[in-house]
Image (tube, rainbow, N blue to C red):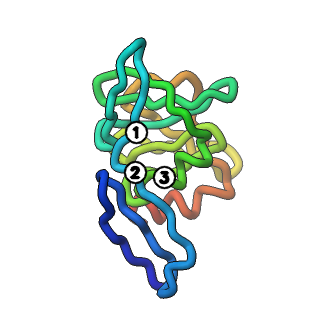
Amino acid sequence: MHQSILECEHGMFVTSNDQNNSQLSVVKQRFLVKRGQQLISLPTSEILYFYSREKVSFAHTIDNKEFVIPFTIEQISMMVCGDHFFRVSRRHVICHQAIHRVLVWFNGKLKLEIRAAVPEEVIISRDRVHNFRIWMGE
């Protein structure tokens, strides 16, 4: 399969998974978030991880701030660059720079220690371990 990246206007990129461009997806470089009465353009380069709690998605930034993101974790995982972000569980999409340590866990799972506080443990299921290890550089 041939994958190409084409730069688009507004800081987004389009990735194509085949030569006919039949499967296009947008890779966002920033998210527009609301904080009080303010709209903030949040670059993905400042986001350590995304997580979901009670059907609401959040972005946690390098400077320890959290923002509500108006997309599901599944949608977010398809919008961010796969070189920098990986969906490690149903509730977490993690940036490589957020990972402090990877621990071998029970039953072939992995546990991540994240550089910033995470509301719950981040465990990678056996089903995702292989792709995660490849993403980490194995």
Q: Nearer the viewer, residue 134 or 52?
A: 52
Residue 56 location, x and y as percent?
A: 62, 27
Picture coordinates of residue 123, whole percent (x, y):
60, 40
Determine whether label 2 and label 1 are within 8 Å by CB.
yes
Q: Give the Cα distance between marks 3 and 2.
A: 6 Å
Write down the quadrant of residue 127 in the picture: bottom right
- Determine the CA span between mark 2 and mark 1: 7 Å
Q: Residue at x 67, y 54 (%)?
A: 126
Q: Residues within 10 Å of mark 2 (few under 14, many from 20)?
A: some
Q: Position of residue 92 (x, y in %)?
A: 56, 39
- Is residue 91 visible from the viewing direction of this image? yes
Q: Which mark is residue 79?
A: 3
Q: Which residue is mark 2?
A: 28
What residue type is disc 1 on? Phe
* Residue 111, placed above or below residue 24: above
Label located before the other in sequence (3 or 2): 2
Residue density around tag 1, few if under 14, some if 14–19, many if 20 or more, within 10 Å: some
In the rendered image, which quarter is residue 111 located in?
top right
Q: Amino acid at mark 2?
A: Lys
In whole angstroms, how far apart are the C-alphas of marks 1 and 3?
10 Å
Q: Name the residue carrying label 1.
A: 31
- Compared to residue 45, the image places residue 2 above or below, namely below
Q: Earlier in the sequence, mark 1 or mark 3?
A: 1
Q: Are marks 1 and 3 in contact (CB under 8 Å)?
A: no
Residue type (three-letter) at the residue carrying disc 3:
Met
Q: Residue at x 29, y 52 (%)?
A: 11
Image coordinates for residue 3, horizontal then vertical, percent:
44, 78
- The numbered mark at residue 64 is none
Q: Is residue 132 above or below residue 43?
A: below
Q: Are marks 3 and 2 in contact (CB under 8 Å)?
A: yes
| SS for dot 3 | helix
